[in-house]
Image (cartoon, helix red, strand yellow):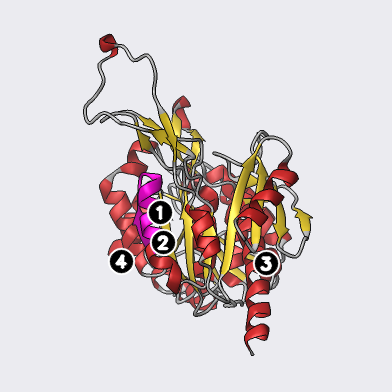
Amino acid sequence: MVEPLAALAGARVVLGVCGGIAAYKAVDVCRRLVDAGAHVVPVLTADAQRFIGALTFSALASEPARTSLFDGGESIPHTRLGQSADLVVVAPATAKLIAKYRAGISDDLLTATLLATRAPVLIAPAMHTEMWEHPAVQENLDVLRGRGVIVIDPESGRLAGGDVGEGRLADPPRIVVAAGAELAPTRDLAGTRVIVTAGGTREPIDAVRVITNRSSGKQGHAIAERGLARGAEVTLVTATERTVPARIDTVRVATAAEMEAEVMARAPDADVIVMAAAVADFRPKAPWDRKIKKDEGLSEIVLEPTHDFLVDLGAAKPPGQVLVGFAAETDDVVANATAKLRRKRLDLIVANDVSQADAGFEVDTNRAILLDSSGSVEEQPLQTKLELADVILDRICGFRRTNLRKDS
């Protein structure tokens, strides 16, 4: 496949910048797009210029920054920009821009360009947590996703005013990789039925409390999103509440038993199963159906093992199906992952040392070791979870090609 950054070479990218404190990060997005070989045309809203000057973008981009429908000597600049673009990226995208784009309102150069283009559109929202979580914003994003707009969800972190929460603009490298991935001319998973699991399951202690783990589901969701972009028919069985593109068949679950039921019911018809979820190994044996009061006291919680249905998937794997597992380890990573690979009859296992701060749970980067059934052990460098998702999918495509040759 064409590497995401390589796909940007020669591409004409309109970079829309909206008003918000995250506008300064758009400078880095611009620089990275140019470094990857893209021809970048910045378009700044009036609000964006309250935070950062157009001259900054003009100095870095391929053309001077555009700020108005009526300045610059062109009668229809939005038409030229929209028709000539290979991709439109809006970073940051504010709640106002998202609402106007959803409703088809055109009152400045950026919104007019968005409505005048048939190129792929990628938006990276950034706003305070309360705004990001508002039902109106989420509904607008769902509508845009349904129209094919690629949404790069924000991250959790420090926000304006010292607040901390979800709504922080995605890191510029992640935005640029997603832009390149959208342009990469590959549909190597077209027609492939893929099941992906994600997130940490939640096992009830009582009606309020649960036993869970630190898995954010980001890696599983990244695999689902990149599988969709590469043409797969994706079913995502997830234990998280993360937003999912509308074209992905999403099944929400909470417990290990619920995830098992949903995956096992669909497994016989799948071409690929990627078990990225951190399924609980233990659950309370007798959960209470009410909240346990603190003053009642609780001397112990008796645990029992959950059923390891990945073993069942390996035992019942039909010819040609590719089965991928994950191993989150803190020591003896390769040895433990190798044992799991063999015991569960996997084709590929993705092993993480989750004791590292920059890889594994709750972060946007990962550092993995890929082990397969042929005995190959391949250590991956630190990269974003979207980048690792494509590496994993590349390996899956290799297994698919091998299986097709065997069947022919």
Q: Secondary structure at mark 1?
A: helix
Q: Magenta region: which residues?
A: 249-264
Residue labelled with disc 3: 395
Q: Residue at x 32, y 51 (%)?
A: 138
Instruction: Please tell me the numbered disc located at residue 260.
Output: 1
Q: Secondary structure at mark 4?
A: loop
State if disc 1 and disc 3 touch (CB < 8 Å).
Answer: no
Q: Amino acid at mark 1?
A: Glu
Q: Residue at x 39, y 39 (%)?
A: 202
**Residue sitting nearer the eye, 272 or 243:** 272
Q: Secondary structure at mark 2?
A: helix
Q: Point out the tag, 3 or 1, that comes first from the N-terminus.
A: 1
Q: Amino acid at mark 3?
A: Arg
Residue labelled with disc 2: 264
Q: Point out the tag, 2 or 3, that comes first from the N-terminus.
A: 2
State if disc 1 and disc 2 touch (CB < 8 Å).
Answer: yes
Q: Residues within 10 Å of mark 2 (few under 14, many from 20)?
A: some
Quarter of the figure with the N terminus: bottom right
Residue 235 counted in the magenta span: no
